[in-house]
């Protein structure tokens, strides 16, 4: 069991980017017959395979497009890319814990950017 004492670095990833990284790990593990895949890793791979819709490059482009919008911070952009909301209600759920809400036009602006990739 590994215990981490401090976080050295943090980086946001979309589900698509995580899928790309985890597929590399999966191939490395498959090549080494003596190395067993841990349950957590197998579940993570299963999750990204199920939920990654875009390819990694598209997901990065969408994050960049969303970041150009005034009220979309980095964490929210990644959340939107992972969820790919199709309606105002789905998008409002992303902002449910935020201290601010987007008005109808702002929601539509975000949905228009997402629609280019969905």
Image: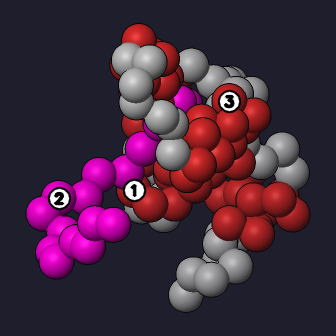
Task: Measure the alpha-carbon separation of dots 2 and 3.
Answer: 25 Å
Screen quadrant of the N terminus:
bottom left
Question: Which one is in front, 90 or 33?
Answer: 33
**As displayed, is residue 93 above or below residue 105?**
below
Question: Which one is in front, 13 or 103?
Answer: 13
Outermost residue toward the top? Answer: 31
Counting from the top left corner in percent of width and height, residue 43 is at 64, 46
Left/right placement of residue 115 relative to residue 12 reads: right
Closer to the chain start, of discs 2 and 3, is 2
Counting from the top left corner in percent of width and height, residue 104 is at 77, 63
Q: Are marks 1 and 3 in contact (CB under 8 Å)?
A: no
Report the residue marked by disc 2: 9
The magenta stretch is 1-19
Which is the main secondary structure of the residues drawn in magenta?
loop
- Mark toward the viewer: 2 or 3: 3
Report the residue marked by disc 1: 74
Q: Quadrant of residue 6?
A: bottom left
Q: Are marks 1 and 2 in contact (CB under 8 Å)?
A: no
Say whether residue 18 is visible.
yes
Q: Residue at x 22, y 72 (%)?
A: 4
Task: Measure the alpha-carbon separation of dots 1 and 2.
Answer: 16 Å
Say whether residue 66 is visible.
no
- Magenta-drawn stretch contains 14: yes
- Mark toward the viewer: 1 or 2: 2
Report the residue marked by disc 3: 49
Counting from the top left corner in percent of width and height, residue 33 is at 44, 18
Closer to the chain start, of discs 1 and 3, is 3
């Amino acid at each position: 069991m590994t215990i981490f004492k401090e976080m050295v670095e943090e980086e946001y990833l979309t589900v698509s980017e995580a899928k790309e990284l985890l597929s590399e790990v999966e191939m490395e593990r498959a090549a080494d017959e003596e190395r067993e895949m841990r349950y957590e890793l197998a579940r993570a791979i299963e999750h990204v395979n199920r939920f990654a819709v875009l390819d990694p490059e598209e997901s990065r482009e969408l994050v960049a497009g969303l970041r150009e919008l005034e009220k979309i911070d980095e964490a929210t952009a990644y959340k939107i890319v992972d969820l790919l909301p199709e309606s105002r209600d789905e998008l409002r759920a992303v902002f449910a814990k935020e201290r601010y809400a987007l008005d109808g036009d702002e929601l539509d602006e975000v949905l228009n950017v997402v629609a280019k990739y969905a």
